[in-house]
Amino acid sequence: MIWQTLKSSYAFLCPWLKVRKDHVRLPSGLEMEDFYVVEANDWVNVIAITEDGKIIIEEQYRHGIQRVCFELPAGNVSEGETPLAAAKRELLEETGYAGGKWSFFCSSVPNASGMNTVCHTFLATGVRKTAEPKMAPSEDIRVHLLTKEEITELLLTDLIIEGVMQASLWRFITVNYGCKST
């Protein structure tokens, strides 16, 4: 089932994204000279729960789909950074929340057929506001503290639309609260 890579080159390069063009041979013998793979840093998501049991959700505009989205605190893992360190950094930068107890929750991939990126999701319980957010100039994030029922409603109405966030949140709700929705 494994494909053999006969040749690779980069069709596009920028600091945060690469597009690799592979010439591959499938086990059947079929050769494809132009199979493209998007290479990017791994991502992190944080399911952050405050000391009083609210889940932190962000609201921001996403130009790729040209709409405002509700999301988990999230971001890229920088070179040389561990996913856990990136998750803690992103939560603090975007929301001003920190502390609590942290654990790895799950991993998912946004598109296994054409991307090499893995999204690592962490669960942070008992977080508290320790600072004001320090967003990048391009970020305009509104922070919401929501209940499990409000999160479920956002999922059911596709207001949380990003697949890696949906997967993590549905798994969290199912594991922690059973299969019942609101």
Image: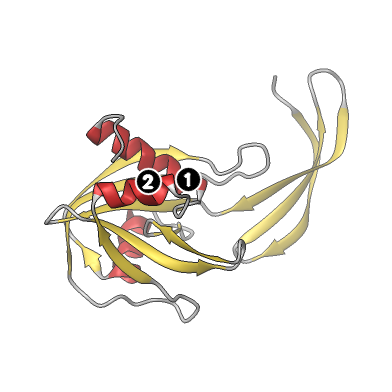
Would you place residue 137 above or below residue 4 in this image?
Answer: below
Which amino acid type is marked by label 1? Val
Looking at the image, the residue that sits furthest to the bottom is: 137
Q: Are marks 2 and 1 in contact (CB under 8 Å)?
A: yes
Q: Residues within 10 Å of mark 1 (few under 14, many from 20)?
A: many
Would you place residue 64 above or below residue 158 in this image?
Answer: below
Q: Which is closer to the viewer, label 2 or label 1?
A: 1
Q: Helix, strand or loop at disc 1?
A: helix
Name the quarter where the C terminus is drawn.
top left
Would you place residue 18 above or below residue 66 in this image?
Answer: above
Q: Position of residue 160 (x, y in %)?
A: 44, 53
Q: Nearer the viewer, residue 54 or 5?
A: 54
* Residue denoted by label 1: 164
Measure the alpha-carbon separation of dots 2 and 1. Answer: 9 Å
| Numbered tag placed on residue 121 in the rendering | 2
Left or right of residue 112, residue 76 in this image: left
Which color mode does the image show? secondary structure
Task: Say whether disc 2 or disc 1 marks the residue closer to the N-terminus.
Answer: 2
